[in-house]
Amino acid sequence: MKLISGAILVLAAEQAYAHAQLVQFPNHESAAAVLVPGSLVLVVLGILMLIWGLLTEVRSSKVS
């Protein structure tokens, strides 16, 4: 479940960053001010969840 959650967070980060780049001129700066830092937070959390999931899945498969 941690691997799936991490992958979803990474995908959400990509979508937030892409949306920040596609917003048109009048709202671009305010959207980028929110979406770019938000995407950075999501990608960090996603990578941490992926690493945590990989570490716990490898341990549990070796124990069984």
Image (cartoon, rainbow, N blue to C red):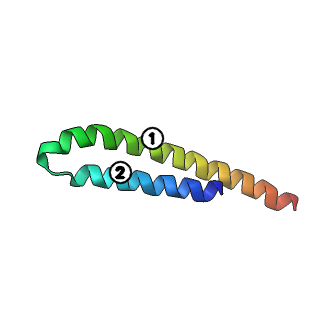
* Above or below, comparing residue 26 to residue 54 in the picture: above
* SS at mark 1 in the image: helix
Residue occupying the far right of the picture: 64
**Image location (x, y in percent) of residue 24:** 15, 51
* Picture quarter with the C terminus: bottom right
Tell me if 46 is positioned left or right of 24 in this view: right
Residue at (39, 55) in percent of width and height? 14
* SS at mark 2 in the image: helix
Tell me if 37 is positioned left or right of 41 in this view: left
Residue type at the position of mark 2 = Ala
Q: What crowding class fits label 2: few (fewer than 14 Cα within 10 Å), some (14-19), or many (20 or more)?
A: many
**Image location (x, y in percent) of residue 52:** 66, 48
Front residue of this view, candidates 12 and 48: 12
- Residue 41, numbered label: 1
Residue type at the position of mark 1 = Val
Tell me if 63 is positioned left or right of 12 in this view: right
**Image location (x, y in percent) of residue 36:** 33, 43
Q: What crowding class fits label 1: few (fewer than 14 Cα within 10 Å), some (14-19), or many (20 or more)?
A: some
Instruction: Residue 48: name its quadrant.
Output: top right
* Above or below, comparing residue 4 to residue 38 in the picture: below
Residue at (46, 45) in percent of width and height? 42
Residue tagged by mark 2?
16
